[in-house]
C-alpha cells in the first residue's frame, strides 16, 4: 500500500496543475498539437463528411456568431491558446457533437435538425467548448496513460507517442462529472451573452430526465 501511495505521489509531482485546477502531464500546447493532428485525421477520414465553409457560408456564420459570443463571455480560460474552430458534419442520422483537445468542434447535421431553438444549439456549442477549455481529454489521458508516461519520463524517453494516440483518444469517454461540469460551464458562458441561458438549462434538464434522449444525444 505504501508503495502504491508513493507511486501515486510521484505521478502528482510529475504532473502539473493546469489553469482549470486539475493535475495533468500534458501542457496546453500539447492539447493544441493533439487537436491539430486529430483534425487532420478527421479531414482524411471519409466517415466525416464536413460541409464546405464557403458553400455553406450562412450556416457557418451562424455557428461562428454563437462561438464568438461564448469566447467573449470572459469565461474561457484558453481563449487565445486554442483554435476554437467549428465544423458541420453532414449526417442526419447522428444526433451528436464532439470536440478535440485544443478546441476543434464538430456538430452533426442530425443534431442541428433535432434541436428546437438557437439557445439549445449555442448551449451544445458551449458544452463542447467547455470540454476543450477544461481540458477533459488530457485529464482522461493522464488517468489512462499516467503510469506509462511517468515510466517514460523516468527512463528519459520521449512521451510524445501518447500525444499521437489520437484515435484512442476519440474513444476515451468523458466521465459523468466531466459531462456535468461541461453543462454547468455552458450555462455560465451563456449567462454572459444575449442568449437565454435558462432556456438552455431547461433543455438539459429535459434531456437528463429522458433516458432515451440522453442515450441518443452523446455530446
Ligand atoms: Zn460532453
Image: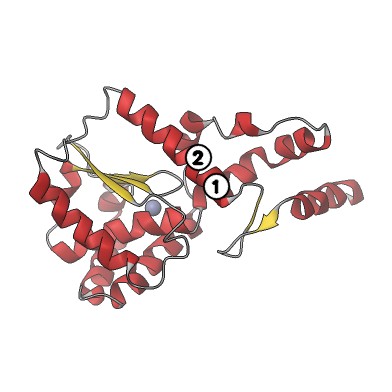
Question: Mark 2 highlights which residue?
Answer: 33
Q: Which image quarter: residue 210?
A: bottom left
Residue 54 visible, this angle: yes
Q: Percent from the top left, x then y, of residue 11?
A: 76, 49
Q: Helix or strand or loop: what does disc 2 sit on?
A: helix
Crowdedness of circle 2 by 10 Å Cα count: few (<14), some, many (20+)? some
Front residue of 144/89: it is 89
The dot on residue 190 is none
Q: Decide: marks 1, 2 in contact (CB < 8 A)? A: yes
Q: Percent from the top left, x then y, of residue 217?
A: 28, 48
Vertical placement of residue 109 versus 19, above or below: above
Vertical placement of residue 67 versus 170, above or below: below
Q: Which image quarter: residue 55?
A: top left
Residue drawn at (47%, 49%) of the image: 174
Q: Which image quarter: residue 209?
A: bottom left
Question: Mark 1 highlights which residue?
Answer: 29
Vertical placement of residue 109 versus 135, above or below: above
Residue 172 visible, this angle: no
Amino acid at each position: 500500500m505504501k508503495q502504491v501511495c508513493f507511486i501515486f505521489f510521484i505521478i502528482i509531482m510529475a504532473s502539473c496543475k493546469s489553469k482549470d485546477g486539475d493535475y495533468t502531464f500534458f501542457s496546453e500546447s500539447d492539447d493544441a498539437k493533439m487537436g491539430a493532428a486529430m483534425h487532420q485525421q478527421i479531414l482524411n477520414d471519409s466517415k466525416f463528411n464536413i460541409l464546405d465553409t464557403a458553400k455553406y457560408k450562412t450556416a457557418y456564420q451562424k455557428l461562428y456568431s454563437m462561438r464568438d459570443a461564448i469566447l467573449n463571455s470572459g469565461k474561457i480560460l484558453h481563449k487565445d491558446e486554442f483554435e476554437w474552430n467549428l465544423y458541420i458534419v453532414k449526417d442526419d442520422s447522428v444526433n451528436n457533437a464532439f470536440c478535440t483537445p485544443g478546441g476543434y468542434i464538430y456538430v452533426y447535421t442530425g443534431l442541428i435538425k433535432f434541436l428546437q431553438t438557437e439557445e439549445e444549439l449555442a448551449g451544445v456549442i458551449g458544452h463542447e467548448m467547455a470540454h476543450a477549455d477544461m481540458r477533459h481529454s488530457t485529464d482522461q489521458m493522464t488517468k489512462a496513460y499516467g503510469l506509462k508516461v511517468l515510466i517514460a519520463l523516468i527512463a528519459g524517453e520521449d512521451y510524445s507517442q501518447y500525444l499521437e494516440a489520437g484515435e484512442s483518444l476519440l474513444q476515451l469517454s468523458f466521465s459523468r462529472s466531466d459531462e456535468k461540469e461541461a453543462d454547468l460551464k455552458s450555462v455560465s458562458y451563456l449567462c454572459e451573452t444575449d442568449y437565454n441561458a435558462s432556456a438552455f438549462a431547461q433543455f438539459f434538464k429535459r434531456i437528463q430526465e429522458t433516458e432515451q434522449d440522453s442515450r441518443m444525444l452523446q455530446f
